[in-house]
Image: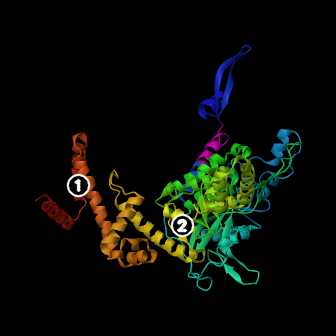
Amino acid sequence: DYERLALMNKAIVAEPTTLGADEVYKITDIIGTEPDLGVENLKGSGLIAGETSSAYNDIFTLTIVLGRTVGIGAYLVRLGQRTIQKKSQSPIILTGYQALNKLMGVDVYSTNDQLGGPAIMYPNGVSHTVADNHLLAVNQALDWLSYVPSMRGGLLPITDIQGIDSIERNVEFCPSPGVPYDPRYLLTGVEGDDGVWQGGFFDKGSFNEALSGWAKSVVVGRARLGGIPMGVIVTENRTAEAVKPADPADVTASEAVIQQAGCVWFPNSAYKTAQAINDFRGEDLPLMIFANWRGFSGGQRDMFDEVLKYGSMIVDAFVAYEQPVFVLIPPHAEVRGGAWVVLDPSINSSVMEMYATAKTARGGVLEANGAASVKYRVKDLLKTMHRLDDKLVALDAKLEAASDAEKAAIASEIKAREQSLLPLYEQIAVQFCDLHDTPGRMQAVGVIEKAVEWEESRNFFFWRLRRKLAEFDLRKKMQEASVIGRGLGKLSPIAASSLMKKWFMESTELSADMWKDDKTMLAWMAQSYEELEERVKALNKDSVVQEVFHVLTGGGQTSAIGTAGLVEGISKAYKTMSPEEKESFKKMMEGALA
């Protein structure tokens, strides 16, 4: 047996030992004669997991869960990120309920849906959407694909909106100040009380929400602007609920319902925001953010629940973004403190721009009430009263000239006047602080590009988006043309845009201000297409020249090795040329070295 199993088939590992008076073999390891009997399966699972994780960054990944998904299958669902889950008999689980019941010695769970059904995976953000049946799940997948380029870096799938919507129309829905509303109306529009449709920012019927069951204090999805697909994130301004179900395995557990205020980032909504940005990046979608955040929730529970970590992930996601990102503060909205920090265009100035709705948008460190309570305290208000109020000025003068017997009565009169004026001056102080947060000041200090009229925002951003997409496409060609050899002269995105602006100024008689005009810029790019192609070729040639020059003049070993390598490379290339190409090459070399 030992010779057959150990020596011939290598199915076991054994060592000689004695049992009584007999010499026998003790089996120490069983290898087996068939593959895939044990831990090697986990190695394969690890390989699949690694490839799926890499695929998320390289291509568009989407999982439709139509049946039970267990163990590594559950991890693959999450590693692919985008998930559509069927509502029935499609749990995403690590271990089946029967195995858990045996482990605990009591029948706690009755179905796998209690562990990973839509009631669990949809509210926690693993499943992006849910579908009632197979057909609807596939339809959702096809609809999702309609927003995504056919390949990474490819052209966006632009749809014709004639007969559905108009690019030039105004945005008709506008929220009222201080009145909570569904933020989706900003995107989709809504039917008014009079039955008339009030159009939103995006094309009618084009908004598809994702992750709506999770972190409801922020809304994310995909929509189209003039037929161009975009990712969209908008703040929920109403109070939302986060429900944590009770675990049947814990007899002391109970369902927890947490109220989450609107216009605030909580740990789950910050994570949702970062997750959505990463998803949109992988889909090569431009991004539109309607920002209305007063900051992050920094209470003890939320700090323990890692709000700081998830807030930082938003910045990480923006840094990696490569398509245009527009941040707009909508009507009667505000961005304050730490929320502004993670949205500021300086995070990735090559792709991000920030705008504010004219007149009603606000931005600053603190809200006006908070700033007034810090910067304009009661003592400061009293000083202002005594400087501006004629009656108090007269009473102050009267007090200085009064006798000791009259001062008490005058002081009492001054006190009464101060108390009567204090509410008014508190309002004035708040208004004074509010005037430091207006779109006009934001633009004056350079933190936003410009103030945009809300009614005209759809038309403005459509042309801005078209211009940016064309600019980014040319910029990408310029950057690729500048990468030769070691890539020492590679253009950064900002440098490429600056060079593009220089070309614009050289090839037109327009002023520098016209560079900011999106329609003029698009017309120039269309009219100068052939010229721009030649300029890109010239840039590529100049990059080759600079690389060769640096190789030959590097000095020391760099120069010696580089020269030898260059000559050898020319020799190899020369041997592959046709006779006509060789003759042309010789003439070029003779002319260059003459």
Q: Is residue 283 above or below residue 110?
A: below
Q: Is 44 part of what is drawn in magenta?
A: yes
- Nearer to me, 245 or 437: 437
Kind of residue sitting beneath label 2: Gly
Q: Left or right: 594 with respect to 344? A: left
Residue 570 shows which numbered tag? 1
Amino acid type, label 1: Ile
* Secondary structure type for disc 1: helix
Q: Position of residue 357 (x, y in %)?
A: 59, 69
Q: Position of residue 550 (x, y in %)?
A: 25, 50
Quadrant where the C terminus sits is bottom left
Over which residues does the magenta segment extend? 32-49
- Residue 216 in view of the camera: no
Front position among marks 1 and 2? 2
Task: Give the percent coordinates (x, y) of residue 536.
Answer: 33, 67
Residue 440, disc: 2
